[in-house]
Image (cartoon, grey):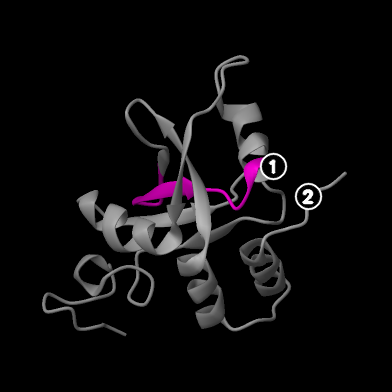
């Protein structure tokens, strides 16, 4: 039996189809509990395009798809359950480099990236904000 999708997964699907309000999607991400794999004493992240992406998953099925490709052998993949707001407001700034949140990256046609820009991460670490937190266009 297939698990019902989370509200965030539904919003991501709607956004990928060209609908939904991007602000509503960000709000839902902030309110959602995401499963973040833990490896080597830290949260699982990847670097791409000059950004460090913390990887989060909307449910255990999405995390399992990721684990099939990333976990060594049949080793279980430890994870932390974290509120999206905590990831982007606290953990991303603590990384000390441009960082964002990548959600459900192993889900075909279901991934969504929340980049390090104003409105997603704190202005102080947003790549599109000036030195005083002023947003650049």
> What element does badge 1 sit on?
helix
Measured as percent of width and height from the top left, residue 108 is found at 72, 49
Task: Tell me the magenta residue range.
Answer: 47-60
Q: Quadrant of residue 101?
A: bottom left
Does the stretch in magenta take in 10? no
Quarter that holds the C terminus = bottom left
**From the viewer's perspective, is residue 37 above or below residue 9?**
above
Does the stretch in magenta take in 50? yes
Residue indicated by mark 1: 61
Q: Quadrant of residue 115?
A: bottom left
Circle 2/circle 1 CB separation < 8 Å: yes
**From the viewer's perspective, is residue 39 above or below residue 125?**
above
Residue indicated by mark 2: 3
Mark 2 or 1, nearer chain start: 2
Res. 42 in view: yes
Q: Residue at x 22, y 52 (%)?
A: 94
**From the viewer's perspective, is residue 120 above or below residue 53?**
below
């Amino acid at each position: 039996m297939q698990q019902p999708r989370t509200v965030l997964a539904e919003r991501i699907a709607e956004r990928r189809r060209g609908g939904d309000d991007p602000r509503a999607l960000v709000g839902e991400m902030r309110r959602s509990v995401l499963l973040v794999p833990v490896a080597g004493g830290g949260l699982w992240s990847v670097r791409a395009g000059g950004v460090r992406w913390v990887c989060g998953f909307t449910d255990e099925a999405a995390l399992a798809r990721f684990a099939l490709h990333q976990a060594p052998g049949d080793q279980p993949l430890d994870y932390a359950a974290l509120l999206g707001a905590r990831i982007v407001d606290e953990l991303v700034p603590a990384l000390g480099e441009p960082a964002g949140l990548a959600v459900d990256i192993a889900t075909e046609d279901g991934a969504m990236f929340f980049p390090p820009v104003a409105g997603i991460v704190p202005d102080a670490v947003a790549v599109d904000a000036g030195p005083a937190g002023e947003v650049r266009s």
